[in-house]
Image: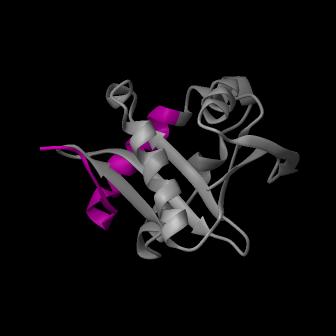
Amino acid sequence: MAPQIRPAHLADLPCILQIIDAAYAPYIVRMGQKPGPMLDDYAALIRSNTIEVLDDDGACGILVLLPQKDAMLLDNVAIAPDAQGKGYGKQLMCHAENAARDAGFDRIRLYTNEVMVENLAIYARLGYHETHRVTEKGLNRVYMEKPL
């Protein structure tokens, strides 16, 4: 059975927290602090229906989309390390872009920390361009957008 993207349920919370921890913990040393996604309230995101999971016999990826006034914000995308390299990240990114289009947006926005240079390169390859850099919540973020 092919992996499915579906709304997250509270029963997914332990898997979601494992995915977040595994995906972002390696950046703690580089950043000198926990990355922003490690500080989010995932139970609240589930209750507000803003988080989806990629389910391949269990949650192996997550996606958080937040509609804004002028664009869809891709607030978080993460794949469990043992599920990386299978095209799941690209599947979630395509899903995010389609969801933004379906919601009537003509662009999608995201941000990543300036020290997550691997992510900056991935997003650039996917057609995102840098719009600005800012320090928010003590984190040095690089904002990027892609026209849809």
Residue 96 vs residue 84: left or right? right
Residue 141 appears in the picture as rendered: no
Residue 7 vs residue 28: left or right? left
Q: Nearer the viewer, residue 106 or 144?
A: 106
Q: Is the magenta stretch mostly helix, strand or loop?
A: helix
How many numbered dots are placed on residues in this image?
0
Q: Nearer the viewer, residue 13 or 106?
A: 106
Residue 7 among those drawn in magenta: yes
The range drawn in magenta is: 1-23
Up the image or down, 4 lies above or below 102; here it is: above
Q: Which of 33 and 12 is in front in this view?
A: 12
Residue 61 appears in the picture as rendered: yes
Counting from the top left corner in percent of width and height, residue 138 is at 82, 47
Counting from the top left corner in percent of width and height, residue 119 is at 63, 31
Q: How is the image coloured?
A: one colour
What residue appears at the point 30 percent right and 66 percent down from the top-left corner? 9
Up the image or down, 67 lies above or below 75; here it is: below
Up the image or down, 142 lies above or below 70; here it is: above
Residue 116 among those drawn in magenta: no
What residue appears at the point 62 percent right and 30 percent down from the top-left corner? 125
Q: Furthest residue to the left? A: 1
Counting from the top left corner in percent of width and height, residue 105 is at 62, 69
| The image quarter in which residue 115 lies | top right
| The image quarter in which residue 148 lies | bottom right
What residue appears at the point 43 percent right and 53 percent down from the top-left corner? 95
| The image quarter in which residue 6 lies | bottom left
What residue appears at the point 59 percent right and 48 percent down from the top-left corner? 37
Counting from the top left corner in percent of width and height, residue 39 is at 61, 52
